[in-house]
Image (cartoon, rainbow, N blue to C red):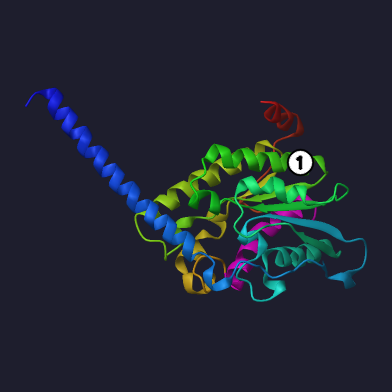
Amino acid sequence: MTGALVLGSAIGVLATAMLAVRAVLDRQAAQARRLIGKPLGEDAIEADRVWRRKLGGEPLDLLILGDSIAAGLGAQRRKETLGARIAIGLAKKAKRPVRLRTAAVVGSESSGLGLQLDDLSHDYRPDVAVIVVGGNDITHRIPVSTAVHHLVAAIIRLRARGAQVVVGTCPDLGALRPVPQPLRSLGSRMSRQLAEAQSDAAVAAGAYAVSLRHAVGPFFISQPDEMFSLDRFHPSPLGYRRTAEALLPAVAGALGFGRTSAATRHPLPERDVAAAQEA
């Protein structure tokens, strides 16, 4: 057999193997999408209100954008949602009430951030906005560059409204035990790549970035029974508490109410942000 024939045969075998792996991954991804959220339904608990009203003074406005984690799917009571926990913690640090507005949508990808902002009134000016998004971009195989583009566009719009912005980067999908291998390992690698790209882009666009993979990922891996809700995909009340605790220092620090944590990356100086946005 000539060298050309051997090479052609090897390429054919490799292509067949790649197609087989792709078919397996496609089936596993479809199965995961069918399972995610099933025991919880599609609606998160409504938690929008003024929290800690008795503190007195003008409330701070907190906006939550993103996907089902941002919306609080899996929480059993409204005070257990991500937005409510951040609002309560911020009120304690600022000694002022906090008015929560949740625009996050269950199942949203990064491309949905623009629509979430479109639904806000033009005169709404939040003091701080928290964005948690990325998991659905991974499960629907959205290119990292596309997902990050939509995230940056949302940050720019929020900064134009005068808001400080905190981005909780994509969680580690490798913690999702119900997702079979090899899809789980692939999801872990892809979510890590997206999280790193989100962090770099958010900081360059003038936002604070918090690595959820580093800040809370180890809890979800080592304590899955406590950290996940019934569907084994979304956080439990304890999972939301841990996630809120990871984000709160950045949220409060962005408004001048304390120091940010070691897991927080700070935005670039304004002159560098302007140059990055122009580029």
Magenta residues: mostly which secondary structure? helix
The span shown in magenta is 236-260
Residue 118 rendering spot, x and y as whole percentages: 76, 47
Which residue carries the number 1 mark? Answer: 157
Amino acid carrying label 1: it is Arg
Q: Residue 82: which quarter of the image?
A: bottom right
Q: How crowded is mark 1: few (under 14 residues within 10 Å), some or many (20 or more)?
A: few
Direction from residue 163 to residue 175 in the image, left or right: left
Q: Position of residue 240 (x, y in %)?
A: 62, 67
Total labels: the figure holds 1
Quarter occupied by the C terminus: top right
Quadrant of the rendered image containing residue 229: bottom right
Q: Is residue 100 visible?
A: yes
Q: Position of residue 198 (x, y in %)?
A: 59, 43
Considering every residue shown, the one lying at the far left of the view is 1
Is residue 260 in sight in this rendering?
no
Q: If the image is split into quadrants, where does the N terminus sit?
A: top left
Between 187 and 219, which is closer to the camera in this rendering? Answer: 187
Residue that appears at 83% across and 44% down: 162
Of 173 and 220, the residue lying toward us: 173
Is residue 224 placed above or below 140 in the rendered structure? Answer: below
Q: In this view, does 27 lie to the left or right of 206?
A: left
Q: Where does the image place residue 177, in percent across and percent down from the top left?
A: 42, 65
